[in-house]
Amino acid sequence: MNMATGVTPPPGASSAADGHTIESLLVPLLGSAYRAALRLTRDAADAEDLVQEAAVHACRGFGTFEPGTNFRGWFFRILTNCFYSRYRKSRREGTQVELEDAPELYLYSQTAAIGLHAETEPAAALMDRLDAEAVAQAIDALPDEYRVVAVLYFLQDFPYLEIARILDVPIGTVRSRLHRGRRLLQQRLWTIAEDRGIVEALRRKEAKNG
Amino acid sequence: MADVSRLTCEEVFRRLDDYLDRELSAEEMRLVQEHLDVCAVCTAEYRFERKVLDDVKEKLRRLTAPSGLLAKVQRAIGTVR
């Protein structure tokens, strides 16, 4: 049995399905698969290894892929399975995150507190100063189970139901992990903005304008 | 008589993430939109969250894969044939 796909591939598994080869379906996904793998593993070399491992499993199990169904969902299920087995993680394990530790509308409240809401676009005033590296750093800081769901949502735009299928968890689990993960992400973004002096610069700017 | 189909600010707030993610039913999407059309406070929260969400998504997707990844993957899947 293929441990990543969870199925036993029939002979000729890597051959064409419905006129498509594994390469023709996989190659367009490599960029997004790498970006997802990088946020999952938090290491560039590990991310490349993870994508290769998932590609090998996908190739072996290609005979079980049903032509006409969602190849992207099928492949990301394999990729996340590889991630879980590689790091010996359980998809159902949870970290206790107290809701009080992750308040609602955190960035909205914090930017209001420093007077940014006099601006027409307070979110842009903050987010335009946070670069892609800062956002990646904030995602990387999420506990595993929140990070996996966030990666499938933020990077791949999978709907909740598809994420539930990929991770083999109830849709309610996806919804709660994504909602809490978003709150934790906002907290982390604010901390990064503070550490980089962005908050202080915005505060001074508003004080000067006010 | 009050229109019971209208959502309160609290009800909209509880649906905000699902509304942002388009995970509500068509009827609930419409009810939230109706509320946002007339409530400046909820609209300000919605617009803020929308900008943060879109910005996070866009920045996470900027990274490109290493140039050698395609060749490595092709080599790797070549070994299973």
Image (cartoon, rainbow, N blue to C red):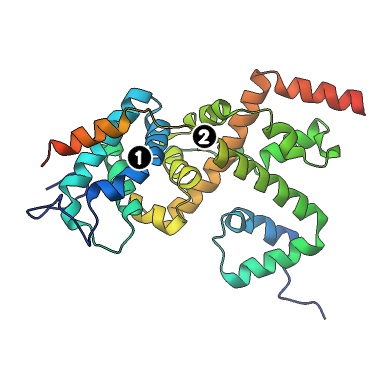
Camera-nearest residue between A18 and B25: A18
Query: Label 1 sits on what residue type?
Result: Leu
Q: Is residue A100 left or right of residue A34?
A: right
Could you tell me which chain the residue with mark 1 belongs to? A
The reply to whether residue B15 is in sight is yes
In the picture of the structure, the residue carrying the numbered disc 2 is: B62
Could you tell me which chain the residue with mark 2 belongs to? B
Badge 1: few (under 14), some or many (20 or more) residues near its Cα, within 10 Å?
Answer: many
**Residue at x 30% of width, y 46% of height:** A26
Q: Quadrant of the C terminus of chain A?
A: top right
**Residue at x 40% of width, y 52% of height:** A163
Provide residue B76's location: percent of width, then percent of height. 19, 34
Residue occupying the far bottom of the picture: B1
Q: Mark 1 and mark 2 in contact? Answer it, CB < 8 Å.
A: no
Provide residue A9's location: percent of width, then percent of height. 12, 52
Provide residue A190's location: percent of width, then percent of height. 65, 29
**Residue at x 68% of width, y 22% of height:** A194
Q: Is residue A137 left or right of residue A70?
A: right
Both labels 1 and 2 in a single chain: no
Camera-nearest residue between A188 and A51: A51
Residue occupying the far left of the picture: A11
Query: Looking at the picture, does residue A152 appear above or below residue A162?
Result: above
Badge 2: few (under 14), some or many (20 or more) residues near its Cα, within 10 Å?
Answer: few
Query: Looking at the picture, does residue A13 appear above or below residue B34?
Result: above
Q: Quadrant of residue A193?
A: top right
Provide residue B60's location: percent of width, then percent of height. 52, 36
In the picture of the structure, the residue carrying the numbered disc 1 is: A30
Q: Quadrant of residue A79?
A: top left
Query: Label 2 sits on what residue type?
Result: Arg
